[in-house]
Image (cartoon, rainbow, N blue to C red):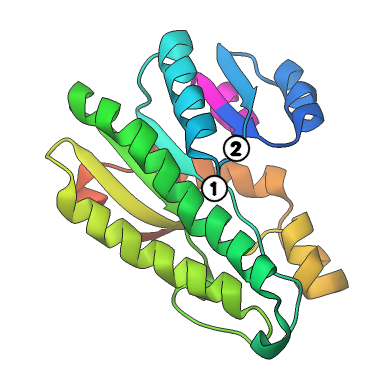
Amino acid sequence: MAIEFSNRGWQVAGGARNTSALEKLKPELITDHFLHPFDITQPEEVDKFANLTKDRLGIPDLLVNNAGLINKNAPLTQVQPDEFASVLAVNLGGIHNMIRSFVPMMQKAGRGIIANFSSYWGQSTAPEVGPYCATKWGVEGLTRSLAQELPSGLGAVAFNPGVINTDMLRSTFGNEAEEYENPNEWAVHAVSRLEALSPSDSGNTVIG
């Protein structure tokens, strides 16, 4: 997505815990950009990233909350509490941290779209991925609540990216993941969908 947005002329800010992945991405971006390592589960690190982004590139027009973690396939009775807590901390707590840090500045600017990544499992379920399903159902509810709180000019959507051949999918689907789009192919239509969002979409679930 970062590469596709940059190719279309967007300034891009982003972060991850994997510093080497960020360094590898930098040469691929052809527009002004700011990539910074941080942990989305740590509020103070998210605050720092938000302030640095504002200083370097300005207030975002589009906030994409796509950080995600899935549990290892297992029945709920066998999922350890620390793993369950980690999935919650990234998939829901991380979005909350980003909202706290970025939305107030977007409100002051009077514009902006927040796209919180959901999933088909945000409105359905599957065995052995209960913690992940629970968080994605949570994303749907959190997004609808946020949409009701936003002033005119802003909007929040739950963004269902579809099924993509990523490391996360391979951890669950195994070799079957190869049957689905790779991220570069997916990004073309996903970015088009994100670019087309407006405040009139607020409160909806949008499929990428």
Figure check: 80 above or below 96 = below
How far across and how far down the image is residue 68, in percent? Answer: 60, 54
Quarter of the image holding residue 63? top left
Amino acid identity at mark 2 = Met
What number of labels is visible? 2
Q: Earlier in the sequence, mark 1 or mark 2?
A: 2
First to last magenta residue range:
1-13
Q: Looking at the image, which residue is at 47% across and 53% down?
A: 93
C-beta proximity under 8 Å, tags 1 and 2: yes
Q: Looking at the image, which residue is at 46% across and 41% down?
A: 64
Figure check: 172 above or below 109 = below
How far across and how far down the image is residue 51, in percent? Answer: 43, 19
Q: Looking at the image, which residue is at 34% across and 39% down?
A: 100
The residue indicated by pointer 2 is 1
Quarter of the image holding residue 76? bottom right
Residue at the limit of the structure toward the left, as seen here: 152
- In space, the residues marked 1 and 2 are separated at their CA atoms by 10 Å
* Residue 160 magenta: no
Q: Secondary structure at mark 1?
A: loop
Q: Looking at the image, which residue is at 44% across and 77% down?
A: 123
Q: Secondary structure at mark 2?
A: loop
Looking at the rendered image, the quarter that the N terminus falls into is: top right
Can I make out residue 56 in this image? yes
How far across and how far down the image is residue 22, in percent? Answer: 73, 27
Crowding around mark 2 (Cα neighbors within 10 Å: few <14, some 14 to 19, many 20+) is some
84 or 37: nearer the viewer: 84
Amino acid identity at mark 1 = Asn
Figure check: 49 above or below 58 = below
